Image (tube, helix red, strand yellow):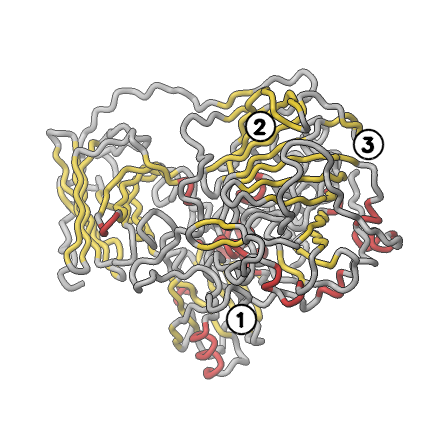
Amino acid sequence: MGARRRRGAAAAAAAAAAAAVLGGAAGGRGRGGGGAGPAGAGFPGTGCPYAALWSPGSPLRLPEGHPALALHSLPADAAAISLRGLLDAGVGNASAAAAPAGAEGGPGYCETSNPFSGTRDCTQFLAGTSAEAARAACAAGVSMPGQAGEFSEGRCPQYSNPDFGGECMRTTDAGIEVTSVMTAQDGNPMGDCAMITTVCTTFIQGNWDPSAKCAAEAPAGGEEEPNCEGCEDPRECEMMPGVGGGAHISPFGYWSSICPLQESPYASPLVYRVDSERFFMESKHTERSRTWYDATINAKRMDNSQEDGFSLDQEGFDQTGEGEEEEGNPFSFDRFEAFENVTETTMFHIDNKFYWFAREGGECLMTMNSPVGILRPNWILDNKNTKSTRTQYLGKQYLEYDDGFSLVKQWRKIEPLEGAYMIVSFEDEPTWETPEGLRSRHIQRTTPGAPGAGDTIEYFYNHTTDFDAAEIFNFTKYDLSTCEGKEPDRSFGPPGADEGNSTEGEDGGRPDFSSFLNENPNLRVDESFVDVLYDGLPGAVPIVLLEAQVEAPPFKPVVRVPLQGGAVASKDPYLALNYTIDEEAGTFEIEVETNYTGGWVGVAFPETPCAMVPADAVIAEFGEDDEIVVGTFRLEDVLVSGTKPDPKQSLAGSSAGRTGDTLRMTFSRAFDNGGRERVDPSKDLVINWALGMGDKVSFHPHRGCVPLWTSEGVRATSVEALDGP
């Protein structure tokens, strides 16, 4: 059932030339004025609001080695492998480099500090590589591009680690065979055997040779399980792993009529066309496009007019006016020589690739990797894939649309990168006749601001399934084979500008990550968000998903651990923790001292020892004039948006200050301080620590966990923090 229409067959059948003209939508809300512009918020012609984070040459591109960037960097010849089972944010946590076995006889290894996992990556050079070539590769960044390492003779220390998990072999761009030596952390779903296996085979695209430890944990059998009842192909109904799966098919998956909720009248047809008009709230820019979707082959086509562009700078969004120079427009197509004098383009998104052509066809203008497949037709209706992609059915209301008002049903869904939400409005009742039965047209979508975009409101018109898909996806007219070697110049940005975000501050101090995410979105999700699922099927009613309200028993702490103690959590950078318990008051005080100067400092009390989430945290951030502000936070997700201020937690007192290069933070809290995580002084306590980049909570180059006290009767002693470690 649901056999996929193969691309080769579709191409062979597509002999007729098609000149799909982007038609001006007649009448309707917001029609008329406003020039057409580059389709896609954040990067032209993709329709992806977060493309600015991963597009080559974008001034907002994440730095090389960033774990999120790895999700967007599948090689051009990536095999059609399963991505199912990968957790969000796992890439940066498993000795992220590349390559496996046979390390005997090589010239040595390269160790690199991974700024995102807080660990040391080790890459073993294999036999056949000279010591000179290995040293040069290590200095250039063999584990993480641009991250110089330290070369040593011998074998990676991870081989003798009892947690040795395996080797992942690859060949570098310079033709050097290397192997990443990985360790597996039991109980850590972001770094256990299953995860590092997936990281190697899926993202590194290496050959995985597990250790005996991980080989014993490998699932029996070799056949992948299908994704749905009735599915025959593991690619069928396969969602993108992690947060991307909240909306997208995996880069190598496809959709069929038997996929979950595809029978809902509020799921889009598998194959359809729609016109859209998008309004950018900040720039006042308007763009129009016509888009065709064919989920059965994971393909999308978008026709755009690129005659006008829009400008973006770090201080805001400003549409380029008539007669103005476009010199400062980092996302204008004229930054690519291939688009010179081309005003009307056709973009294809197929599997894990974007392809651009002039509207009339001919040779490919440009190609680019895509981190995800196209939108899955049912994306707004469920909360599948991660707990971050929550969905709330909002009910009915009237919406101004098409020179009148329409009764609509609305859903909103969390866009978890920034803890903001998007809203989609559908016709109240299905009236659209499609090959799959009556469907309700989606007529408006509100999308929260992303880098390079700002909030947008998009209206949809002229929905139809009446077209020849083989003619639209005509790969004779649009010859994909001519795209080979047409990747963009990574240095195309504004004159004099370096590509991407810097991990260093302007004055060499704390780095600035403010442009990665919209820290204060207008559509921010707050605690009032309640998950409400409604699929619109006959007889269905909205289902409210509430957390179980279990009244906790009274908590009477009994102290069975030393009243004072401490631990050195990290030697480089140095971080020491000391504690004092006030048994009578029912509180304890923690003092944190560190010589780290790169940014914010935090400690957390996790639900599961050493797991990042969920946890209650106390974090010292930097305000104006380097004022240090201590606050309480709840960590619900590994994404930045999952860290939220938590007023429910109370501190009996707190202070923080810096003397020279030494930062000291002290706070006192009750064992039960109103947060989610009670601290039981009769049991062992393991706390997490993190040293982050920038003034505010963001990604952290150093992190770990440390036992602070123990109930085994061995009295801990305070540590002398920063007395010449």
Measure the C-alpha gap from mark 2 to mark 1. 53 Å
Of tags 2 and 1, which is closer to the observer? 2
User: Measured along the vertical axis of the image, is residue 673 above or below residue 286?
Assistant: above
Label ID, residue 435: 3
Judge from the rendering whether residue 375 lies leftward or rightward of residue 522; answer left or right: right
State the residue in front, 296 or 208.
296
Percent x, y for residue 121? 42, 63
Judge from the rendering whether residue 94 lies leftward or rightward of residue 47; answer left or right: left
Mark toward the start of the polypeptide (2 vs 3):
2
Whether residues under marks 2 and 1 lie with C-beta atoms below 8 angstroms apart, the answer is no
Residue positioned 53% across, 78% down in the render: 127
Percent x, y for residue 451? 49, 49
| Quadrant position of the N terminus in the picture | top right
The residue tagged 2 is 411
Q: Amino acid at mark 2?
A: Trp
Residue 558 appearing in the image = yes
State the residue in front, 666 or 585.
666
Q: Amino acid at mark 1?
A: Gly
User: Measured along the vertical axis of the image, is residue 189 above or below residue 53?
Assistant: above
